[in-house]
Amino acid sequence: MQLNAQNDSGGNWNFSLYADMYYGKNYTVSDNTEQSISELVSFHRFNEISLNTGFAILNYSDSTKFFSAGAGIGTYMLRNMTAEPLGYRNILQCYGGVKLFNEKSIWLEAGIMPSHIGYESAISMDQPTLTRSMVSDFSPYFETGMKLKGDFKHFNFSALMLNGWQRIWRSNQEPGNHFGVQAQYSKDKFLFNYSGYCGGLGVNNANVQRVFHDVYTKFSMGKTWNIWLLVDVGCDKQVISKNFWWGTAAVIRCDINSKSAISARLETFKDPNRRIVLSTVKAAEIFGFSINGDVLLRPQVLLRLELKQLQASDYIFFNANSTFTRSSLQGLLSIAWKLMK
């Protein structure tokens, strides 16, 4: 069999550039540059002007296939990709899909793709708040594998075979299989989503099986108000034990006009057995509140201000001189560009 390349006049190419610069200040700890909880990977630098994300993405699509490839730099990439080999640490995504039947919308996708878990992405302009909620930051941003997806009138379903829990590279010694599932219902101004994961955690956790459930909904009230509700529950199963963690988030957003909006978020996260937040020396039980203000300076330039309070039940936020505090009050100013051609 010989494959010949040919021009597809019915296809659509587009190229996009995205950059998000920010300045952060933590008012309740000393002038530490790094966020004290290392699992929070976005907007985690303070007291300096930083590049959170800089992405270049190339897309192609037509009626029967698509492909997307993107590379990135920034503090988000530095912190979130440390588990991958050097050659993979700047890959944002590289995946494609093909329609399997002409008369049915059933697709097979494969590659390094955005996570099927949660509604928040690495591109802050695409989400209702500047930073991701804690429970979203503690779950995968990306995944590698194959996805079988069916799109119907109000429903779509996906089944996934993955390399692991937010992994690109899978070592030869890593045991077990990793699977995902997603189901969505959408109609008019309402969306309901369930996403699940079941699989191992790599060589260092050979006897651990992770089961994770993600449920969120979005609905709109008129043209002005939008609400997101999110609940995540995870469990790491070992031979004689089960360790749970869970979190919630609620976001309400009001579009004041075509160029400005405000939003507020309430969130909780509990990890009593330190399965997710490994960088703390004590169990994580955190309550958070944030408020955002957005101004669209130009059609593709967004200015955002976020004030976020995190309050823990124990002393888990690193301060100075090997001391810790229970509170973290952060102010973040961001300006982001999204340029498309």
Image: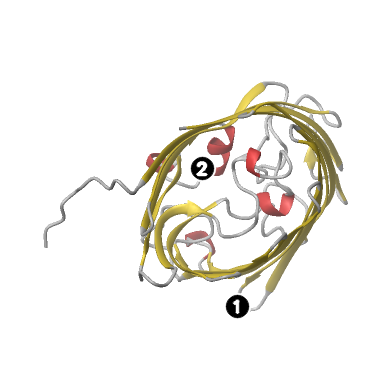
Question: Residue 188 at x, y = what percent?
Answer: 70, 62
Q: Residue 165 or 263: which is nearer the viewer?
A: 263
Task: Name the quadrant of the N terminus.
Answer: bottom left
Q: Residues within 10 Å of mark 2 (few under 14, many from 20)?
A: few
Q: Is residue 269 positioned above or below 332 on the image?
A: below
Q: Which mark is residue 82?
A: 2
Q: Residue 61 or 216: which is nearer the viewer?
A: 61
Tell which circle, 1 or 2, labels the residue nearer the N-terminal end: 2
Q: Secondary structure at mark 1?
A: loop
Q: Residues within 10 Å of mark 1 (few under 14, many from 20)?
A: few
Quadrant of residue 12 in the image?
top left
- Tag 2: amino acid: Thr
- Residue 270 in view (yes/no): no
- Tag 1: amino acid: Val
- Residue 69 in view (yes/no): yes
Q: CA distance from mark 1 to mark 2?
A: 29 Å
Question: Residue 152 at x, y = what percent?
Answer: 53, 71
- Left of 31 or right of it: where is 176? left
Residue at (88% x, 51% y) in the render: 313
Quadrant of residue 319 in the image?
top right
Q: Residue 98 or 325: which is nearer the viewer?
A: 98
- Outermost bottom residue: 240
Q: Which residue is mark 1?
A: 239
